[in-house]
Image (cartoon, grey):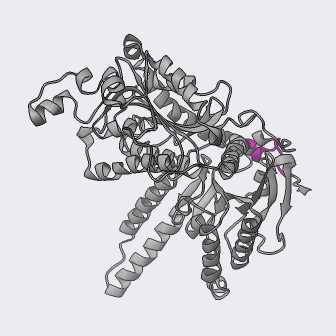
Amino acid sequence: MTRIETRIDPGSDEYAARRAALLARVAELRELEQRAVIGSARARELFERRGQLLPRERVDRLLDIGSPWLELSTLAGYGIDEPELVRSVPGAGLITGIGFISGVRCVVSASDSGIGAGAIQKMGLDKMLRAQELALENRLPFVQLIESAGANLLTYEVAGFIHGGRLFYNLARLSAAGIPVIGIVHGSSTAGGAYLPGLSDVVILVRGRAKAFLAGPPLLKAATGEIATDEELGGAQMHATVSGLGEYLAEDDADAIRIGREVMGRLGPAFSPEPGAATDWRGAEPVHDPDELAGVVPLDFRQPVDMREVIARVVDRSDFLEYQPGFGAQTVCGYALLYGHQVGILTNNGPIDPAGAQKATHFIQSCCQTGTALLYLQNTTGYIVGRAPEQAGMIKHGSKMIQAVSNATVPSVTVHCGASFGAGNYGMCGRAFGPRFVFSWPNARTAVMGGEQAALTMRIVTEATARRRGDPVDEARLDALAQSILVNFERQSDAFHTSARLLDDGVIDPRHTRRVLGLAFAICREAEQRALRPIQFGVARP
């Protein structure tokens, strides 16, 4: 392969300005993430009084010490639970991620009961559904740390109730697919939430704290007039000895996690720990320092950047075998190794033209033929427009590219590195096209088009309509309309806004891109190698 030679000068004023701007966005990201950590930790005194561990302490104890942990969707719900951004706590009351437990890579979902007693928030439902989807698609055991007050009745919406059934559908499908579901119940699991342990293959209950019932004492009394205690209805002791809901009765949170780790270590041949999987990172480091990524890409997507500079700081040895470099040159395709994983990379140095779309289509099909995983580094304003591109078959060739992306038979991973506008988002494997993982950089912008283009388009249309009707053109009104559209587009295209709505799997520090992608492709490879033992139905309790 050919080593990419850099033209970036870390000593230049341009590099320094770009780096400072991007690191400011990273600092903002970390501050937002810390809101959930701090908010949950405020309940420490209450948890200690009850003899409990905080939710993040539970996760820390569950995971293997020193092993990689890829936390997902940390900005979920930001600005949705609380429209006033300065008061909004991201995370949607749930901690999800992929890590190692007793040497086995797993998806972990933990109720953050330090925030709102773990009540399910609007985006918390979608966040858990995404975690389940990742477990199913990547053949990873699904581990739930459960302590939730259930649905928030103060913000109840019928759509949440209906869509919430998908949680239980997914648990049943995981079990039937031969993918173990482990439930550790640390506290309440009421009403529909009772089916979280009910649909787990193995359930561990914490004595004196775990509770699972379809109707708690208040609802039971309201519905039937019957009076019963928590323990009689759904206490840990009752479920472990009478109902048969639980396999193991733990003395406290720490004991429950100990049992959970033991269970994970005995899942059978399909889930035997892969020696060195958590620590063996093959592949030579890039020649060009990944830390320099903070100064490579500008915050303003209008400023050009050669995406080969990004590739050079992500792939092994900065080596890249470019595919058809002289054809459709603004669409960059080629082969590289990433921690030893062979990947085919597609990225953009401008809009996608007919030649670029043809090249990308051919490249994707070639990667599918050889079983090479695909990495999309999005940085495009979309498919090129104009008389010449239209006559050259832009729609036809763009459609072929979208067909190739949609039907690719190899794992795909997408990173939003800059602009992701219009159908370019589709052609470069945006969220709707089912990549295994989607990550965003803090500077990324995603929209149907740029805000300025949207504002100008509506201005032209409004002016034409007024003239056609013979009405006077109100310039002040047009200016206000344009400004309103621009503000709306700028707000919604922001990476923090899109990530809050789970349009990606998380915003990452660009300097960590290589490490995050290494984890993602290792997960994809492991899924392909794992032979499951599916059964007709999920594991059912007697």
Task: Work out which quarter of the rendered image holds the C terminus and state it.
Answer: top left
User: Which of these two is toward me, 292 or 54?
Assistant: 54
- Quick one: 14 or 94, which is closer to the camera? 94
Hey, which quadrant is residue 214 in on the image? top left
Residue furthest front in the image: 542
Question: Where's residue 346, x and y in %?
Answer: 72, 62
Against 446, is 238 above or below?
above
253 to the left or right of 83:
right
Query: Which is nearer the eye, 69 or 422?
Result: 69
The answer to whether 332 appears left or right of 483 in the picture is right
On the image, the x and y values in percent for residue 329 come to: 78, 70
- Which residue is found at the position 34% from the left and 34% from the top? 119
**Residue 40 located left or right of residue 385:** left
Q: Residue farthest to the right? A: 2
* Residue 474 in the image: above or below residue 180: below
Observer able to see residue 39 = yes
Magenta stretch secondary structure, dominant: loop
Q: Residues in magenta?
A: 6-16
- Does the segment drawn in magenta span residue 351? no
Where 82 falls versus 370 (above or below)? Answer: above
Query: Residue placed at 57% from the left, 66% from the top?
Result: 426
Q: Say if the magenta span includes residue 11.
A: yes
Relative depth, front residue between 378 and 206:
206
State the image coordinates of residue 436 (x, y, percent, origin top left). 60, 54
Q: In this view of the protein, can residue 70 be seen by the observer?
A: no
Residue 531 x/y as whole percent: 64, 50
Quarter of the image holding residue 420?
bottom right
Which residue is located at x 66 percent, y 82 percent? 389
**The residue positioned farthest toward the left in the image shown:** 225
Name the quadrant of the N terminus: bottom right
Q: In this view, does 186 lie to the left or right of 513?
A: left
In the image, farthest residue toward the top: 49
